[in-house]
Amino acid sequence: MKNAIYMDYNATSPIRPAVIEAVATVMAEVGNPSSVHAAGRKARGFVEEARAKVAALAGARSRDVMFCSGGTEAANTVILGSGAKSLIVSAIEHPCVLAASAVADVPVFTLPVTESGTVSLNALRELLEKAPAPALVSVMYANNEMGAVQPVADICAIAKEYGALVHSDAVQAAGKIPLDMTGLGLDYLTLSAHKIGGPQGVGAIVLSPTAPLKPLMVGGGQELGRRSGTENVAGVAGFGVAAIEALNHLTDSAGLSALRDKMENSLRQHANDIVIIGEKAERLANTSCIAISGVKGETQVMHFDLAGICISSGSACSSGKVKASHVLNAMGLDSELANSSIRVSLGVDTTPAHIEAFVSSWKKLYDRTKGR
């Protein structure tokens, strides 16, 4: 993989060198953070230092950060543990939110999105009028497939009028756009370390001081009783380092946006029948969802893989199973176009040369499949 061009940052981000160093340092230590002796106190220090760093990334207080195994556990804990009497879930949520909602044993209402990929605020009001209170509204901060940034501030303001709680899955937004949980008035915000250059298998829930949360994991009462089980000290420490590095590089988004726009403009100049999904919405600077009719997304992924370029299909992929994207279908795309999409997501190591290589390979694919 050393010579591969990696353009799949929304799936996972290459781990940052400083994170590897921090994880290795902590793994060389011994100590359970729940122990009161010197080794335990040192381990606790690593965890609390990381907690403060993740809080800074989220725009929250350190004491309101709860570590867990990743974004999926974080979302499940919120959906199943908020105590809400009903759920209002956007149609474009990550599968972990949708699946948790399906087993929550409370009424679930689907919040539709516009053709641009952002939720309908008018529909939110209508759903809050009829949803049993208190409701939990779950809308991701930014979409993982086409990058549309959601109107979280407006969602929070409307929800508060009805006494509803608000959860935002910020897994994709973290490190790409500023997060201000306290300022927005969110009740729950969920994060994953490996999307920002941290270790895989580490995540966090950030709660407002008044947000209720029934633990999903019980036992020893770690994480202030919110999530039992000995903390992954090395992973948590790496998460903290990744959080600060991500916070310090937020301004890099302008450069990524320029690279993405250059890529999309080059493709459009070559083929005016391509579709850039979600381009009318505010998008994450690094994300582009591109569709050409008649060429399946997985076929395109294989083409680029053979060319040494890593991208994803626009179809949702879970454990190697490719199926039609519920996100693109919710936006009103027909199945053929939705199944002919790819996602290109850029990151800290993306260069103009990578963009040129992708564009060149894409043109070859397009010309071959369109008979040019």
Image: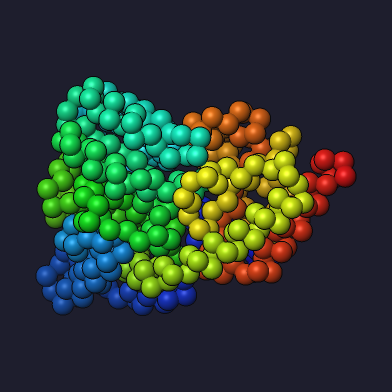
On the rendered structure, is 141 left or right of 349? left
User: Is the image coloured rainbow, by chain, by secondary structure, or in one colour?
Assistant: rainbow
Residue 51 can be seen in this image: yes
Q: Quadrant of residue 88?
A: top left
Q: Where is residue 108 in the image (x, y as percent from the top left)?
A: 30, 26
- Residue 204 in the image: above or below residue 148: below
Farthest residue toward the right?
372
Residue visible at 83% across and 47% down in the picture: 367
Q: Position of residue 172 (x, y in %)?
A: 43, 53
In the image, 194 versus 107, the foreground residue is: 107
Q: Where is residue 304 in the image (x, y as percent from the top left)?
A: 71, 53
On the rendered structure, is 282 left or right of 342? left
Residue visible at 18% across and 62% down in the picture: 61
Q: Quadrant of residue 63?
A: bottom left
In the image, 136 versus 155, the foreground residue is: 155
In the image, 198 versus 265, the foreground residue is: 265
Q: Position of residue 241 (x, y in %)?
A: 35, 71
On the rendered structure, is 273 left or right of 194? right
Residue 342 can be seen in this image: no
The quadrant of the picture occupied by the N terminus is bottom right
Q: Quadrant of residue 201?
A: bottom left
Residue visible at 42% across and 76% down in the picture: 18
Residue visible at 39% across and 37% down in the picture: 119
